[in-house]
Amino acid sequence: QVQLKESGPGLVQPSQTLSLTCTVSGFSLSSYSVHWVRHHSGKSLEWMGRMWSDGVTSYNSAFTSRLSISRDTSKSQVFLKMNSLQTEDTGTYYCARSYYYFGYYVMDAWGQGASVTVSS
Amino acid sequence: DIQMTQSPASLSASLGETISIGCLASEDISSHLAWYQQKPGKSPQLLIYGANSLQAGVPSRFSGSGSGTQYSLKISNMQPEDEGDYFCQQSHKFPWTFGGGTKLELK
Protein backbone atom coordinates (compact mmCIF):
# COMPACT_ATOMS: atom_id res chain seq x y z
CA GLN A 1 0.00 0.00 0.00
CA VAL A 2 1.42 3.35 -1.06
CA GLN A 3 1.75 5.79 1.83
CA LEU A 4 3.45 9.10 2.46
CA LYS A 5 3.62 10.76 5.86
CA GLU A 6 4.93 14.20 6.71
CA SER A 7 6.45 14.99 10.09
CA GLY A 8 7.98 18.04 11.66
CA PRO A 9 7.39 20.86 14.12
CA GLY A 10 3.99 22.48 14.12
CA LEU A 11 5.34 25.83 15.29
CA VAL A 12 8.32 27.72 13.94
CA GLN A 13 9.52 31.14 14.99
CA PRO A 14 9.90 33.90 12.39
CA SER A 15 13.31 33.96 10.68
CA GLN A 16 13.97 30.35 11.73
CA THR A 17 14.32 27.24 9.56
CA LEU A 18 11.56 24.75 8.83
CA SER A 19 12.56 21.10 8.58
CA LEU A 20 10.04 18.52 7.41
CA THR A 21 10.42 14.82 6.70
CA CYS A 22 8.32 12.79 4.27
CA THR A 23 8.51 9.07 5.05
CA VAL A 24 7.22 6.85 2.27
CA SER A 25 6.24 3.21 2.09
CA GLY A 26 4.92 0.90 -0.60
CA PHE A 27 7.23 2.26 -3.31
CA SER A 28 10.87 3.10 -3.94
CA LEU A 29 12.26 6.62 -4.10
CA SER A 30 14.54 5.36 -6.87
CA SER A 31 11.51 4.79 -9.09
CA TYR A 32 9.22 7.72 -8.28
CA SER A 33 9.55 11.47 -7.80
CA VAL A 34 8.39 13.15 -4.58
CA HIS A 35 7.07 16.70 -4.54
CA TRP A 36 6.39 19.23 -1.84
CA VAL A 37 3.19 21.29 -2.14
CA ARG A 38 2.01 24.00 0.24
CA HIS A 39 -1.57 24.98 1.00
CA HIS A 40 -2.27 28.33 2.57
CA SER A 41 -5.51 28.19 4.55
CA GLY A 42 -8.33 29.54 2.41
CA LYS A 43 -6.09 29.86 -0.63
CA SER A 44 -4.84 27.66 -3.38
CA LEU A 45 -2.08 25.11 -3.58
CA GLU A 46 1.51 26.07 -4.35
CA TRP A 47 4.08 23.68 -5.84
CA MET A 48 7.39 24.12 -4.04
CA GLY A 49 9.79 21.65 -5.59
CA ARG A 50 10.58 18.04 -6.19
CA MET A 51 13.12 15.27 -5.83
CA TRP A 52 13.40 13.28 -9.04
CA SER A 53 13.81 9.51 -8.91
CA ASP A 54 17.44 9.92 -10.03
CA GLY A 55 18.21 12.27 -7.16
CA VAL A 56 18.05 15.55 -9.11
CA THR A 57 16.03 18.37 -7.58
CA SER A 58 14.02 21.21 -9.10
CA TYR A 59 12.52 24.16 -7.26
CA ASN A 60 9.93 26.85 -7.65
CA SER A 61 11.88 30.08 -8.13
CA ALA A 62 9.33 31.81 -5.85
CA PHE A 63 11.30 30.32 -2.99
CA THR A 64 14.63 31.53 -4.44
CA SER A 65 17.47 30.14 -2.35
CA ARG A 66 15.42 29.50 0.80
CA LEU A 67 14.41 25.97 -0.10
CA SER A 68 16.35 22.73 -0.12
CA ILE A 69 15.06 19.21 -0.80
CA SER A 70 17.14 16.11 -0.13
CA ARG A 71 16.57 12.41 0.49
CA ASP A 72 17.83 9.27 2.16
CA THR A 73 16.76 6.38 -0.03
CA SER A 74 17.88 3.79 2.55
CA LYS A 75 15.35 5.21 4.99
CA SER A 76 12.71 6.00 2.33
CA GLN A 77 12.68 9.62 3.41
CA VAL A 78 12.59 12.94 1.59
CA PHE A 79 13.47 16.12 3.46
CA LEU A 80 12.41 19.73 3.06
CA LYS A 81 14.38 22.57 4.59
CA MET A 82 13.31 26.17 4.20
CA ASN A 83 14.98 29.05 5.97
CA SER A 84 14.05 32.63 6.82
CA LEU A 85 10.47 31.71 7.58
CA GLN A 86 7.86 34.47 7.75
CA THR A 87 4.24 34.47 8.90
CA GLU A 88 3.10 34.07 5.29
CA ASP A 89 4.79 30.66 5.27
CA THR A 90 2.07 29.41 7.62
CA GLY A 91 0.09 26.62 6.01
CA THR A 92 -0.18 22.89 5.45
CA TYR A 93 2.77 21.21 3.75
CA TYR A 94 2.18 18.06 1.71
CA CYS A 95 4.52 15.61 0.09
CA ALA A 96 3.17 13.77 -2.94
CA ARG A 97 4.37 11.05 -5.29
CA SER A 98 4.44 11.37 -9.03
CA TYR A 99 5.36 9.25 -12.04
CA TYR A 100 5.33 9.62 -15.82
CA TYR A 101 2.55 7.67 -17.51
CA PHE A 102 1.86 7.63 -21.26
CA GLY A 103 3.22 11.12 -21.71
CA TYR A 104 1.72 12.73 -18.63
CA TYR A 105 2.83 13.30 -15.07
CA VAL A 106 0.52 11.75 -12.51
CA MET A 107 0.64 12.97 -8.89
CA ASP A 108 -1.39 10.14 -7.49
CA ALA A 109 -0.64 9.82 -3.78
CA TRP A 110 -0.36 12.48 -1.11
CA GLY A 111 0.53 12.53 2.55
CA GLN A 112 -1.95 13.72 5.13
CA GLY A 113 -0.14 17.04 5.42
CA ALA A 114 1.90 18.78 8.12
CA SER A 115 0.40 21.93 9.59
CA VAL A 116 3.02 24.62 10.16
CA THR A 117 2.44 27.89 12.00
CA VAL A 118 5.05 30.63 11.88
CA SER A 119 4.68 32.74 14.99
CA SER A 120 6.68 34.08 17.88
CA ASP B 1 4.92 30.99 -14.71
CA ILE B 2 1.73 29.58 -16.26
CA GLN B 3 -1.35 31.09 -14.63
CA MET B 4 -4.37 28.83 -14.10
CA THR B 5 -7.70 30.62 -13.77
CA GLN B 6 -10.50 28.51 -12.39
CA SER B 7 -14.23 29.29 -12.52
CA PRO B 8 -16.54 29.57 -10.79
CA ALA B 9 -15.03 30.14 -7.34
CA SER B 10 -18.02 28.43 -5.78
CA LEU B 11 -21.20 26.72 -6.81
CA SER B 12 -24.11 24.89 -5.32
CA ALA B 13 -25.69 21.85 -6.94
CA SER B 14 -28.71 19.69 -6.24
CA LEU B 15 -28.59 15.93 -5.84
CA GLY B 16 -28.40 14.31 -9.27
CA GLU B 17 -27.47 17.53 -11.04
CA THR B 18 -24.65 17.78 -13.58
CA ILE B 19 -22.12 20.54 -13.03
CA SER B 20 -19.04 21.81 -14.81
CA ILE B 21 -15.92 23.59 -13.54
CA GLY B 22 -13.64 25.45 -15.93
CA CYS B 23 -9.90 26.03 -15.95
CA LEU B 24 -8.13 28.47 -18.28
CA ALA B 25 -4.37 28.37 -18.73
CA SER B 26 -2.36 31.47 -19.65
CA GLU B 27 -0.69 29.48 -22.46
CA ASP B 28 -1.12 26.18 -24.28
CA ILE B 29 -0.47 23.36 -21.80
CA SER B 30 -1.01 20.50 -24.31
CA SER B 31 -3.44 18.58 -22.07
CA HIS B 32 -0.93 18.37 -19.19
CA LEU B 33 -3.80 19.07 -16.83
CA ALA B 34 -4.97 17.29 -13.69
CA TRP B 35 -7.98 17.74 -11.46
CA TYR B 36 -8.05 17.13 -7.71
CA GLN B 37 -10.76 16.96 -5.09
CA GLN B 38 -9.99 18.07 -1.55
CA LYS B 39 -12.25 17.68 1.46
CA PRO B 40 -11.85 19.65 4.70
CA GLY B 41 -8.87 18.46 6.71
CA LYS B 42 -7.86 15.98 4.01
CA SER B 43 -5.18 15.87 1.33
CA PRO B 44 -6.01 16.39 -2.37
CA GLN B 45 -7.17 13.30 -4.25
CA LEU B 46 -6.36 12.89 -7.94
CA LEU B 47 -9.46 12.60 -10.14
CA ILE B 48 -8.27 13.22 -13.71
CA TYR B 49 -4.84 13.38 -15.38
CA GLY B 50 -3.85 14.13 -18.96
CA ALA B 51 -6.97 16.33 -19.19
CA ASN B 52 -9.37 13.42 -19.71
CA SER B 53 -7.97 10.21 -18.17
CA LEU B 54 -9.86 8.97 -15.14
CA GLN B 55 -7.64 7.93 -12.24
CA ALA B 56 -8.18 4.35 -11.07
CA GLY B 57 -10.91 4.06 -8.45
CA VAL B 58 -12.56 7.39 -9.27
CA PRO B 59 -16.30 7.14 -10.06
CA SER B 60 -17.18 7.40 -13.74
CA ARG B 61 -19.50 10.36 -13.07
CA PHE B 62 -16.30 12.45 -13.09
CA SER B 63 -14.96 13.36 -16.52
CA GLY B 64 -12.46 15.83 -17.94
CA SER B 65 -12.17 17.48 -21.31
CA GLY B 66 -10.41 20.27 -23.10
CA SER B 67 -7.28 21.13 -25.02
CA GLY B 68 -4.89 24.01 -25.59
CA THR B 69 -5.69 26.56 -22.92
CA GLN B 70 -9.27 25.61 -21.97
CA TYR B 71 -10.26 22.64 -19.80
CA SER B 72 -13.24 21.53 -17.80
CA LEU B 73 -14.26 19.01 -15.18
CA LYS B 74 -17.77 17.61 -15.34
CA ILE B 75 -19.54 15.88 -12.48
CA SER B 76 -22.66 14.04 -13.55
CA ASN B 77 -25.34 13.00 -11.09
CA MET B 78 -24.09 15.06 -8.11
CA GLN B 79 -23.77 13.00 -4.91
CA PRO B 80 -23.38 14.19 -1.28
CA GLU B 81 -19.82 12.85 -1.17
CA ASP B 82 -18.87 15.14 -4.07
CA GLU B 83 -18.95 18.21 -1.81
CA GLY B 84 -15.51 19.73 -1.43
CA ASP B 85 -12.90 21.89 -3.11
CA TYR B 86 -11.69 21.18 -6.63
CA PHE B 87 -8.37 22.30 -8.11
CA CYS B 88 -6.90 22.11 -11.57
CA GLN B 89 -3.12 21.83 -11.99
CA GLN B 90 -0.80 22.07 -14.98
CA SER B 91 2.33 19.95 -15.37
CA HIS B 92 3.38 21.28 -18.78
CA LYS B 93 6.10 23.56 -17.43
CA PHE B 94 7.86 24.08 -14.13
CA PRO B 95 6.88 25.46 -11.76
CA TRP B 96 3.72 23.40 -11.75
CA THR B 97 0.81 25.67 -10.91
CA PHE B 98 -2.69 25.23 -9.55
CA GLY B 99 -5.97 27.00 -10.15
CA GLY B 100 -7.52 29.04 -7.36
CA GLY B 101 -10.04 26.33 -6.53
CA THR B 102 -13.80 25.83 -6.75
CA LYS B 103 -15.91 25.14 -3.69
CA LEU B 104 -18.75 22.75 -4.51
CA GLU B 105 -21.67 22.44 -2.10
CA LEU B 106 -24.83 20.38 -2.12
CA LYS B 107 -27.93 22.53 -2.36
Image (spheres, rainbow, N blue to C red):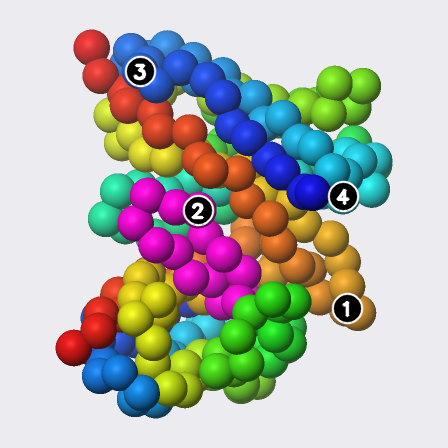
Report the residue marked by disc 1.
A103
The front one of A6 and A12 is: A6
The residue that disc 3 covers is A11
Q: Do the residues labelled 1 and 4 touch (CB within 8 Å)?
A: no
> Residues under labels 3 and 2: Cα distance?
20 Å
Q: Which residue is at 64% across, 76% downward?
A: B53
Q: Are marks 1 and 4 on the same chain?
A: yes
Q: Residue A32 carries which label?
A: 4
Q: Do labels 1 and 3 share a chain?
A: yes
Q: A103 and A21: which one is in front?
A: A21
Residue A6 part of the magenta-drawn span: no
Residue B41 is a magenta residue: yes
The image quadrant that residue B93 belongs to is bottom right
To the question of a shared chain for discs 4 and 3, the answer is yes
Query: Which element carries disc 1, helix, strand or loop?
Result: loop
Residues drawn in magenta: B29-47
Q: Give the x, y percent position of residue A22.
A: 59, 27
State the CA–CA distance, disc 4 to disc 3: 30 Å
Circle 2: is it few (<14), some (14-19), or many (20+) Cα within 10 Å?
many
Instruction: Say whether mark 2 and mark 3 are on the same chain.
Output: no
Left of A54 or right of it: where is A82?
left
Whole-angstrom CA distance, mark 2 to mark 1, is 25 Å
What residue is rendered at 24% in x and 25% in y?
A87
- Residue matched to label 2: B43
Looking at the image, residue B54 lies above or below residue A29: below
User: Marks 3 and 4: in contact by CB < 8 Å?
Assistant: no
Q: Is mark 2 on a helix, strand or loop?
A: loop
Callouts 2 and 4 on one subunit: no
Q: Is residue B79 above or below residue B90?
A: below
Side of A42 where B92 appears, left or right: right
